[in-house]
Structures are given as C-alpha cells and as structure tokens.
Amino acid sequence: MTTFTARKVPSDLAGSGWYELLPAPDAPRELEGNQTADWVIVGAGFAGLSAARRLTQLCPGDRIVVVDAQRVGWGAAGRNSGFMIDLPHELQSDDYAGGREADLAQIRMNRAAIAFAGEMVSEFGLEEHWNPGGKIHGATDGKGLESLKAFQRHLDGLGEPYSDLNASDMKRITGTDYYAGGMHAPGCAQIQPAGYIRGLADGLKPAIEIYENSAVLKIETGATHKVHTGHGSISSPKVIMTVNGHAESFGLYDRRLMHIFTFASMTRRLTTAEQSALGGDPEWGLIPAHPMGSTVRRLKQGRITVRSVFTYNPNLETTAAQVEKLGRVQDRAFAARFPMLPDVAMDHRWGGHLCLSLNSVPAFGEIEPGFYTACCQNGLGVGKGTLSGMLIADLAAGSGEPMVEEMLSLDMPKKLYPEPFMTMGARTHLWWTHRQAGRDL
C-alpha cells in the first residue's frame, strides 16, 4: 500500500470572466462520510469529466464519483482561452509545428477528442458555449508573416487545408488594421470554457455524482483504494487522477512537471455605438503568429478578451499583484489593436495554471494497479484534456481502444533541471521569447 498525501490543493483567485458571465451555480454538494464507489475521479476539468462520460458509456450502471477541490468551472478548466485545437500547436516551438509523423498522429487524435466533445454538446444542449467555426492565426509584421508561411508549408506537407488572409481580410473580420495578414484554420472549435464545463457536469449528473469544494488530501492505494477529503472518504477499486499539474502535489511525477501561468483580461460589454465603431464580425478567435503573442477573442456577448504573458510559477499559484501587473500588458495590447475603443475598460482579470513537460508529453498511465493518471496537457487543456480523459477511461476499463496504445508509447515526462538553474533558465527563456514576440504581444 502507498499513501499519497497532498502538499498543496488548488486554490485559484477571483473567478475568471468566463465564470462570472454565467448565472450563480446552485449550492455545492460536498463529500461527507465514508462511501464506496466503482470509480473515483479526482478533478472535474476537461480530463476528469471526459473520463466520467466515457465510463458511463463503457460501464453503464457503475457508481462513478467525481470530486473537485473547488467549484466546477472555477479552476484551470474555466480559465483558458477556450480553443479546442485540432492542428499541431507546440507552444515550445517558434511556429507551433512539430515533427511530421507525430503531428499527423496528434491531428487524428485531436479530432477524435473534438468529435467526442461535439457529441456531448449535442446531447446536453451546450451549443451556446460551442462555436465550431475554426480559428484565425494573426501576424502583426513581416516576421510574423514569415512564421505563418513556415507553418502553412508544414500544413501543406500534412495535407491540411487553410485559407490565406491578407491585411484587408483581417480588418474585415476583426475590425482592426493592426494585423498585416493571417490564415484561417477550419478544424478548431471555440468554447466558453466555464460554460462548457459546468454544462457538461450538469448533463452528466444523472449518471455520475459530483462533489465540489472537496479537496482530496490523501490517497491510500491497495487492493481497494481510499480517497480522503476533509470531511469524508470514498473507497474504490479504481481511481483516476485528472488534476493536471497538481499531480505533483501528491508526489507524482516529482520534478518532471513545469508549472506555467498565463493571464487574461475581459472587457465590459461594448455598447451598440462601440460595436459599430469597431465593425468586423461579431464573433471570432485569433491566436498570434508567435506562440508568446496575445490571443484575442471577440465574443457574441459583445465583449473582447485578451490573453497574454506566460510566467514560471513552480509553487503552483499566482497572486493578485501578479494578475494586476500583467493585466497592464493586456491593456496595452488592447489599446494597440482597438484604438477606436478608447473608453472600454476591463471588467475581469485572472490567471490560469498550465502544466508542461520538457519533452511535451503527458503524464498518462497506470501508476499502481487500479490507480491511473491523465495529467500534464502541455498548455492545451481543452483538446488534450478531453483526449486524455477519454483514453484513460478506455485504459482503465480495458476497452481495447487503439489510441490508448499510442498514448502509452510516448516517453515519460523528462526530469527537470536542478534548482536554481531550472527556475532561472525557465524565467530567462520566457523573458527572451516574449521579447521575440514583438508586436504579436
């Protein structure tokens, strides 16, 4: 028997703009007393709820329990940019591209995840949180255009479609003349992340049980595993951990996970006159040509979000001061892109936790008999979280799904460099790559 004790539990700051746009949720149901279940899933994000959904298909009638340290949609799942991406999106490269064969396999698996999510959207009536209209890549200068051309050549080699966009096209879509050009990739789905996650949890509740504000403090493994929270416990033969970087809080993958935060701001609702002054399409999502640039989305609710800046926070948390300081970077990005909106203030600011490995692989598999992890989504929690959640359920239930073997064939996350060199190197690298982003930031 092994005991995994949490050194830290998730504790995110004020809610993201995505969460605050939603109606207040019902009172949480917290875990109390000593219970038993066929399955326990730790973490109610993209991976955890996707695993729960898949288990309802593979093991109908089993008691499936999901526990989360916070409210559903409050944590990392409700704090990202909301792009469920099908194409290669390697954040540690200059132009998102990776190796050809690995990228082809990743595209196929990403699309399986998008199809899986799309089925849930249809079944649970989540269309208001789902836009399958693709994504725009936007370049702000000649350097960015060169990066886009390199990525397009890579897509040509993969046989993937895209539409080239010139500066006039970009202004027609976005309303701003800040972008020198771009491209449209059709396979991405954009989501309202907190709305999607909360809607998914509500849709699954007849078949599963979800306990919120129930941080897992200890897991004891054995013939039957026991998951302990502050006010209760659950005994189960199968436990699936889907807490992304917080796996390391339990001593799992120790010194193999990089804890990165990124930051976002969301405007107040634009007035009718402001939307008219802006022009462009009423809804679109844009990622920068340089991976360290600013991601921008215009929402059908009449708001604009700007996501920018990555920081290395090995303590797995940010601060209100850091969120406020880096919010000024988003203010500058907004002002540069939308000078026709000089009086539009930000309503919400937030930071969100990402988890990366040095070799860009997940922390996926069976740690001990009946104890599984689907963590470390490498900055792509919407798509890769959905994928790893699906496939960890397939692995645990023994479904024989071929994609499981592909996931298991990946290397283990590499060991990080010793401290203080890891922190110094990571922060220096991020500083330099942010400078390289130039006008894209």
Image (tube, helix red, strand yellow):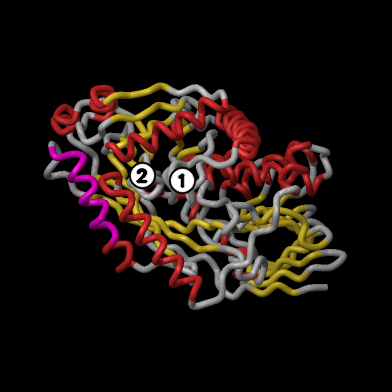
| Image point (43%, 57%), residue name | 352
Q: Which quadrant does the N terminus fall into?
A: bottom right
SS assignment for the magenta stretch, majority: helix
Secondary structure at badge 1 equals helix
Going from N to C along the chain, the mark reached first, 1 or 2, is 2
Query: Can you identify the residue that label 2 sits on?
Result: 21
Please tell me whether residue 346 is drawn above or below residue 128 in the rendered image: below
Q: Kindly check if marks 1 and 2 are in contact, taking CB atoms under 8 A apart as contact.
A: yes
Please tell me whether residue 41 is drawn above or below residue 344 in the rendered image: below
- Mark 2 neighbour class, 10 Å CA radius: few under 14, some 14 to 19, many 20 or more: some
Tell me: 93 left or right of 159: left
Residue 106 appears in the picture as rendered: yes
The amino acid on which the numbered mark 2 sits, given as a three-letter code, is Leu
Query: Can you identify the residue that label 1 sits on?
Result: 194
The amino acid on which the numbered mark 1 sits, given as a three-letter code, is Ala
Give the magenta part as a residue range.
326-339
| Image point (49%, 70%), residue name | 314
Percent of width and height locating residue 182: 34, 30
